[in-house]
Amino acid sequence: MSIVHNLGFPRIGQQRELKWALESYWRGEIDQAALLQQGENLRQQHWAQQAQAGVELLPVGDFSWYDHVLDTSVMLGVIPPRFAQDDQAPVDLDTYFRMARGRAPQGTDSRACEMTKWFDTNYHYIVPEFAPDQEFRIADSRLFDQTREAQTLGYAIKPVLLGPLSYLWLGKCSTTAFEKLELVDRLIPIYSEILHRLKQQGVQWVQIDEPILVLDLPLAWQRAFATVYTRLSNVGARILLASYFGELGDNLHLAVHLPVDGLHIDLARAPQQLRTVADQLPIYKVLSAGIIDGRNVWTGDLHSLLQQLKPLQERFGERLWLAPSCSLLHCPVNRDNETALDPELLSWLAFAVQKLAELNLLKQALDQGEASVAPALAHNQRVITARRTAARIHHPSVQTRLNTITEAMATRHSGYTQRAALQQQLLGLPLLPTTTIGSFPQTDEVRHARSQFRQQRISQQDYEAVIKQHIQHSVMKQHDFGLDVLVHGEAERTDMVEYFGEQLAGFAFTSNGWVQSYGSRCVKPPILYGDVSRPKPMTVEWSRYAQSLTTKPMKGMLTGPVTILQWSFVRDDQPRQTTCQQIALALRDEVRDLEAAGIKIIQIDEPALREGLPLRRSAWQDYLRWATQCFRLSAATVEDKTQIHTHMCYAEFNDIIEWIAALDADVITIETSRSHMELLNAFKAFAYPNAIGPGTYDIHSPRQPTQSEIKTLLEKATAYIPVQRLWVNPDCGLKTRRWEEVDSALRNMVAAAKEMRANLTQHASG
Ligand code: GLN
Ligand code: ZN
């Protein structure tokens, strides 16, 4: 008899209850007791939902008020000194919230801890800060309390801990740099004590997550695994070591031989590792097969999964455990809450609750024979076959077009120098041209009109009139600021991916498919289910209208193919590369139509290009090759005279700079103000050939930049980039700012650029 278990369940609640509770607490509308009660309700609900779906060993400790890495920091007493806390007392909830977001109902504001992406997901964790003399202690009892809570309800449970090595790996050195790994000796006794206490509470199994086992690890870190787990074995409950998000690869031998009682592997991302792991895993250990994809939303092909599992069952018997590939944190909660999707599309989807039910079905088929669940398996096969052959997925014309892709289609006619000269002739821009990244403030008025329009309370015409008014307003403002290249302001978009997804064929939208992004923030990624094409132009009318209001060049504004792919749930029946090419071709049509409508500059944003990098270095080349090709495929349809821009909200390009150059965008705008332009080093060292607009001020900060601050940054930038190829712009879009802020910041920016220009011409003539 195999066992069904789960690595983690979404914590936000089916209706985002956690979000609402947290935000009311932060606003002071409910007290801490009410918040705690809501948390308890949610945990109970989640355990009940999982038990009902057939999970036999329930995760505890996957619930979190904000983030599970922050939970680990707090449990281990890793509290940066600025959150002054009595270092013997348990950490209180408001200190926890201040670490996460700088502010809580109680206590004084302090700089929040950094946040960064959790492996290759869109979930962000709070980065632990370690001092060289870092001490650890058990500073929080939530894991023990929740263990008791679940036991009292009568559940068989498995507490979940982030492993000591992954925890250290994910943290940063607070002040001086030192080798974080050296802290491990001080950390192990605390982990031992935690394991010991859990055992005393009657816990039989603990899940220790070590996702870094799928990364390229330095030798010292690889070696540390043996030391750590030798010391943690036999001190407490049995250990299931969990790896996920990829293949164990060169850590496989190490992972299977650690002195723990079981190993979880990701078979959705890396099914090819099954055979080796099964062959090498010592016979006494549990093999937890992460067989159902925890990162995507598709119904599993149970028949084919069963074929993989059957030989395992013969070998491992009751030591075969079935699980999702990773925690279900990364998928929406329950498909049953979807009301807007049609039944066919719905049947193709499995959210967290449905994925667990699939596992249960697999277990029954294994334990009692397929005949015992024949109708359910047959239904599953009908769904799988229907999806495979559905007319709404497969559009022969899209596929035929894919076969026509050539390298020439992805290559501009002439090289940059020739293009730049032609573009300059046509555009006549001054030295250090000023522009913005695309969006202007989204006012309440626009949001209100959009929601009225969606509820069919106002007509399309009325809605469009509101948007046009906003375009007019932003064009007028930009004239007033004295900007050289204008934008229409993106008032018509709520989200840079959703706006395009809604207009492209092949995308669907859920009404409740929320996934936690960070803290109380959730996103609802579009579902890309079928061949992508563009039924009609998506942005052309807005850009044409905006251009009609001014003689200055109006920049067309598109979201790039890689970013659309990266921020959606993507179909799993063809390589991501193929899907990305389809999006690229659809955008190519849009680019061509914008050019035909007289738009002389087109920006294709790719903020997600870097985050798409595979976890393993060895896979980078392949990804970068197709990702940059897709960008070029969208862009390179234009004539030499049309200027292509791209934008990325970061500037860590050191390791991929040649690929950034390979995009061959005429102008790239990037984030650099926070690093005081130092991130431009990569561009200088590589001798980046095209034009660059390094962000001259941080739009995320409520602080207004002064003219002289901006000028200082620009002067610094000239040390890295020749002035002829330097643009002047903010770090990112201005959507989240207020008009007053934008007003003063952009005026200062334009003034700084003008001052620089004057100095430069004086130099040149003097
Ligand atoms: N054009 C987009 C905007 O200005 C870019 C957003 C982004 O980089 N994330 O809002
Ligand atoms: Zn940006």
Image: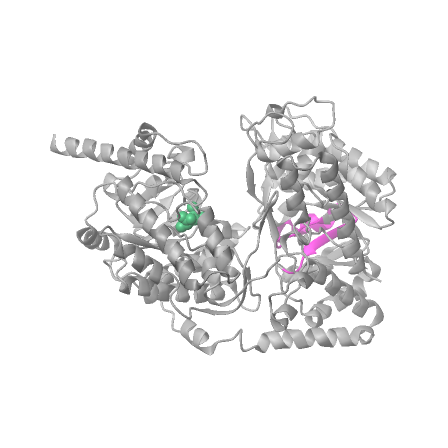
User: Could one spot residue 223 in this view of the protein?
Assistant: no
One can see residue 528 in this view = yes
Left or right: residue 370 versus residue 735 is right
Magenta span: 242-268
Q: Position of residue 533 (x, y in %)?
A: 44, 69
Q: How many marks?
A: 0
Reply yes or no: does residue 246 show up in magenta: yes
Taking the image as shown, residue 493 lies to the left or right of residue 47, namely: left
Q: x%, y% of residue 354? A: 71, 63
Relative depth, front residue between 289 and 643:
643
Q: Residue at x 76, y 68 (%)?
A: 310
In magenta stretch: residue 260: yes
- The residue depicted at 35 percent of the width and 58 percent of the height is 542
Q: Position of residue 260 (x, y in %)?
A: 77, 46
Figure check: 224 above or below 493: above
77 shown above or below 301 = above
Q: Quadrant of residue 626?
A: bottom left
**Residue at (70%, 69%) from the top-left corner?**
302
